[in-house]
């Protein structure tokens, strides 16, 4: 909503839809109030699309099964054996746990992955010789997402893709979320995390949330050490969502009361990342 109470309109003219990206472990750990808010938004006619990750759970399941796991530049090296576990974890346990949380609060949700209905078409990333079956998004069938929304359900999407030959691909959740938002013509992506935004150090040494920052400024802050440690992957993940029609990403803490409605109303909350 804008200050006069109307939600900001996206480029498709659908002013009551938003795309949200969240890590699987973060989303399932959020308080009931977050899912109550999703239900209230749904009852008010606001259409939410969720794209989730699940890296820690995948690593745990691989370890339990005794399957080696490694990363190259932040991408999990994905063999067919690893991909079986990725699909089982993302499309299975995590996806359904999120659906159950939404439905437990009285909302309506349908879980699916990018493989279902060829929702997300993918092709191998450029360095597939190093990372294996990791893909980038070549197309999103927006009509499937729109159809689920039209039926009154929240699509909960696991980030896997498939090519014309039926080969599955592991897709970075942030990249998948940005692609879904772009194909849905959503100018804004909400990234729900367990931090209040990008923290910067004030002159008195205290930490404060940076309300707005450009992609170029983020690179400078990482180089200078102002953004450091565990905040670096969170920020870089958010930047990955900026593609196509997505011109800004808002990083927020999912435990903040009424966080989704506050972002949608244009309130300054969390950190807004814009192109530049």
Image (cartoon, rainbow, N blue to C red):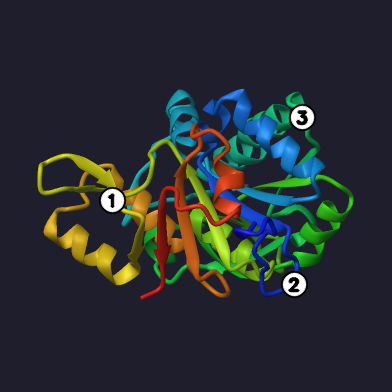
- Residue 233 position in % (x across, y down): 33, 50
The answer to whether 93 is drawn above or below residue 75 in the figure is above
Task: Determine which of the numbered discs, if any, sits on residue 13 in the image.
Answer: 2
Residue name at image x 44 percent, y 65 percent:
128
Q: Who is closer to the viewer here, 222 or 74? A: 222
Residue name at image x 22 percent, y 52 percent:
227
- Which residue bears the numbered disc 3? 103
Task: Determine which of the numbered discs, if any, sits on residue 232 in the image.
Answer: 1
Label 3 crowding class (10 Å Cα cut-off): few <14, some 14-19, many 20+?
A: some
| Residue 150 in view of the camera | yes
Residue that lies at the very extreme toward the left in this rendered image: 204
| Residue 139 in view of the camera | no
Q: Quadrant of residue 32?
A: top right
Residue name at image x 28 percent, y 63 percent:
218
Mark toward the start of the polypeptide (1 vs 2)? 2
Label 1 crowding class (10 Å Cα cut-off): few <14, some 14-19, many 20+?
A: some
Q: Is mark 2 on a helix, strand or loop?
A: loop
- Which mark lies nearer to you, 1 or 2? 2
Question: Is residue 259 found left or right of 67 in the rendered image?
Answer: right
Residue name at image x 83 percent, y 52 percent:
148
Q: In which quarter of the image is residue 70?
A: top left
- Residue 211 position in % (x across, y down): 36, 55
- Determine the CA span between mark 3 and mark 1: 33 Å
Mark toward the start of the polypeptide (3 vs 1)? 3
Question: Is residue 61 found left or right of 74 in the rendered image?
Answer: right
- Residue 141 position in % (x across, y down): 75, 66
- Determine the CA span between mark 2 and mark 3: 28 Å
């Amino acid at each position: 909503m804008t200050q006069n109470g109307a939600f900001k309109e996206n480029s498709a003219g659908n002013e009551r839809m938003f795309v949200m990206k969240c890590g699987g472990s973060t989303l399932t750990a959020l308080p009931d109030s977050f899912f109550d808010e999703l239900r209230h938004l749904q009852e008010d006619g606001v259409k939410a699309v969720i794209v989730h990750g699940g890296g820690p759970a995948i690593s745990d399941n691989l370890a339990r099964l005794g399957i080696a796991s490694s990363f190259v530049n932040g991408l999990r090296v994905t063999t067919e054996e690893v991909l079986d576990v990725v699909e089982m974890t993302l499309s299975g346990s995590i996806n359904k746990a999120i659906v159950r949380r939404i439905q437990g609060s009285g909302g309506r949700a349908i879980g699916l992955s990018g493989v279902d209905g060829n929702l997300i078409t993918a092709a191998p990333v450029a360095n597939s010789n190093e990372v294996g079956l990791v893909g980038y998004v070549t197309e999103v069938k927006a009509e499937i997402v729109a159809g689920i929304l039209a039926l009154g359900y929240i699509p909960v999407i696991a980030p896997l893709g498939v090519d014309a030959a039926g080969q599955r691909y592991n897709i970075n959740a942030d990249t998948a979320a940005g692609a879904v938002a772009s194909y849905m013509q959503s100018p804004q992506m909400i990234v729900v995390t367990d931090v209040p935004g990008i923290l910067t150090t004030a002159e008195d040494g205290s930490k404060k949330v940076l309300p707005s920052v450009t992609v170029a400024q983020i690179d400078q802050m990482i180089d200078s050490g102002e953004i450091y440690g565990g905040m670096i992957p969170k920020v870089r993940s958010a930047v990955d969502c900026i593609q196509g029609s997505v011109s800004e990403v808002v990083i927020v803490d999912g435990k903040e009361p009424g966080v989704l409605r506050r972002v949608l109303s244009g309130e300054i909350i969390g950190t807004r990342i814009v192109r530049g």
